[in-house]
Amino acid sequence: MSTLSCRISAIDKAFGDNRVLRKLSLDLPAGTVTALMGANGAGKSTLVKILSGVHARDGGSIELLGAPFAPATPSQAIRAGVVTVHQNINDGVIPDLDVASNLMIDQLAERQYGFMIKRARLLAEASKVAARMGLDDIDVRTQVSELGVADRQLIAIARAMAHEPKLLILDEPTSSLSAAEAERLFTLIETLKSHGVAILYISHRMSDIRRIADRVVSMRDGEISGVFEGPEIDYEGAVQAMLGHRMTEVDITIPPAGQPVVSLRDVRLKVDSPAFSLDLGDNEIVVVTGLLGSGKTALAQALFGMAPPHAGTVLLDGKPFAPKSPGDAVRRGVFMSPKDRASNAVIQDFDLARNMTVPFLSRYGRLAFIDRRKERRTAQDMIDTLSIVCQSETDGIGTLSGGNQQKVMLGRWLAQPSRLLILDEPFQGVDIRARRDIGRKIRETARDRATLVLVAELDEAFEIADRIVVFHDHAAAAEFRNENIDVNAVLAAVTGSPADARGKSRQAA
Amino acid sequence: MSVDSTPDQTTGDGSATDALPQRRRATLVDHAIRYGFLGLLLGLIVFFSIFASGFAGPRSAVFIFQSVAITGILALGVTCTLVVGGFDLSIGSVATSSMMLAAYMMVILEQSAFVTILACLAMGAFIGLVNGLLIVKTKVPDLLATLGMMFLLVGLQRIPTEGRSIATGMTLPDGSTAEGTFSPFFLAMGRHRIDLVLENLIPVSVIFLIVIGILVWIFLEMTRHGRLMYAIGSNERAASLTGTNVNKYKIMAYMISGTLASVGGMLLAARLGRGDIASGTNLLLDAVAAALIGFAVLGAAKPNAFGTAMGALFVGILLQGLTMMNAPYYTQDFIKGLVLVIALVFTFSLSARKTGSH
């Protein structure tokens, strides 16, 4: 705790008129995990990008172990000892190379490595790094493309460790890990801490922060809005400093469930998974939760015509429902907002309005022609109802923050009435305020349709569900009405038997 | 958290009270990127009007249009495949195949112009369909599928006549003489000129270019089909998850490309009045160049019909002006290549600016 690893003094950064960082100062002590919390748009990622050499700062200074630090490129930052593991796992690994090459890739990229690859030495050094990181169970000769998401994540972190960093930045490292895998990561972080590495841990997950952080720093509007340390960290205070108001519990009034809109009867999502039945009623919001690989996505894909279930029948309003394509499903009134919006939903070249209207273009104008005024009006209405923060409906989608992009994706499907609305991870990469907005909007519009929300985080489930269904092994394993709910019972259902959980999720990932 | 990419945002919002000099400079650069290419085009016209005698005038203008009519039509087709994120390398050989087919139909099979035109259009659409199916169903990458198709057609168009050009009076493989002739109506497509103010001013092929250009522009910019094709080109997976039939649109794009290429081939046959085995070799590269130069027009940074037409025109004006200033013919390809490279730098440094801050 005594030595200072990194001192950030009064740094500024602006993109055009947009001042993203305002005289931000922060100390990062060695051997300490500093959790950084901030809503989307608070400037977290800009801070990370400045530290990791992606962006140059406009003003202020940074000291690393007492020496001035101003990296011009990411590789300079790495060489100086600031190593970043980015949120997007595939940015951290090269799938077509084996584990050993991935772990050693930065050495390979250095000029003094020489022309030829020294295979034996490479394998030996990679094994050493892997062993140090507790990845002994992965064969370093395996192709990374054959590994699951969680293993890739650990490799990206292990790769970072090959540099013996002084400051390690982890950006949302647990976002695709199961509980057991996250625990493995935390053990790793504790090891690093004992070696005197300063760790900057960026996360939205309170449970992670409670588990791992020695101090919590809140960020808001480009400034540090609170530093919380000591034996008893004031987490509520940290959240308040981040949001400007206290976290309030969401009150759920469960409406009387209507007629079943969708009925799944003896459905098997995989050949060898157990059969289950599930009804989704009118006006009802059903949240399906479960670990990574528990079959949530398979359920969504079956209902949206992407991969039919292996057995069983699905009824929509009493009629057989077996869509052959997403287009088929949309025509029957089954809409889905997919997870991972950047790759599955956002159309980067389109502005906000055009992103919203993609599925229902035929409703904007006669014949095949698009009535742009009508299109804009729809977009403006949605901007108002979803309180999307933007300049106008012609903003490029890429200029919006994650939360606002997600709102656009939601607006895309709320613009027309549906029978079943599937929302796969609607709160992914979204700050708490946008999460509340989105949750409220989902609940407000839930009348006259069935809503199926798939989330991994229980907090999110409690915030919006009428009914929570826990998935395990590609089938509904337990069901809870979201009223005086016993969190521990839900948790127990989610994890199944703890020894089993890790094996399952790794296998499926 | 990103740099504003549209220049007109400064005027719209009242919050930008403290307009920074930096911002103004950025707007200036944005304007330069947006209108730079059209400005260059204008400058070129002014330059040649002053220094190349006889450049300024309706006849010269029409000549330029005529010189780019066929490549322009092909380029509009390839633009459609670029919009869905594909590429059609077979357009040049589709056009020459269409030319040979037209000559074969009329000279050897002695068919009417109407039947000939239908046959050529059907062939172009069919080749597009095959290209599309190869790409969509058998998952052959677009460049490779259409490259294969290009080779196949280059060979195929020579088989019926054993590698010879087709003209009235030629000796057929069986020893007889080809008696058929090109129908006057068909020839008029490539040769007739319409009176407009001046006598015999506008060639029919130029009207073809303008009409097709407007149709493709309307289709891509104003209809939902065009919009969805752009969506597919930008994020295919996202488009398919909104319920768009991605495969259908991709096949359609290649069919449009093939059909337009066959139109270009017919115009070529009508202009030449024979099925010339040696002509049309430059069509592919010129058309692709026009479509890619089009990326830079109005800072679109994406394939678009207006840009493609401007790209074709740009190349046409440049070559015509240089020819009139007595630049040797063999420098033409070099200049085309240079323009293309500059336009691509324009386009891609621009899109890097647009997305670089994320």
Image (cartoon, grey):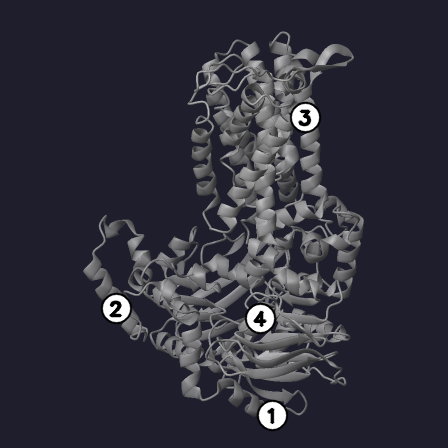
Q: CA distance from mark 1 to mark 3?
A: 73 Å
Q: Name above or below for residue B81 compared with residue B35.
A: below
Q: CA distance from mark 1 to mark 4?
A: 30 Å
Q: Which residue position is annotated with label 3?
A: B208
Q: Name above or below for residue A459 compared with residue B255.
A: below
Q: CA distance from mark 3 to mark 4?
A: 48 Å
Write down the chain letter for disc 3. B
Q: Quadrant of the C terminus of chain A?
A: bottom left
Q: What's the amino acid at mark 1?
A: Asp
| Mark 2 or mark 1: whose residue is earlier in sequence | 2
Q: Which residue position is annotated with label 1?
A: A486
Residue A220 vs residue A105: left or right?
right
Q: Which residue position is annotated with label 4?
A: A302
Judging from the image, what secondary structure is the residue with disc 1 in?
loop
Q: What's the amino acid at mark 4?
A: Ala
Disc assigned to residue A127: 2
- Percent position of residue B297, x then y: 62, 34
**Disc 3 with disc 2 on a shared chain:** no
Nearer to the camera, B39 or A464: A464
Judging from the image, what secondary structure is the residue with disc 2 in?
helix
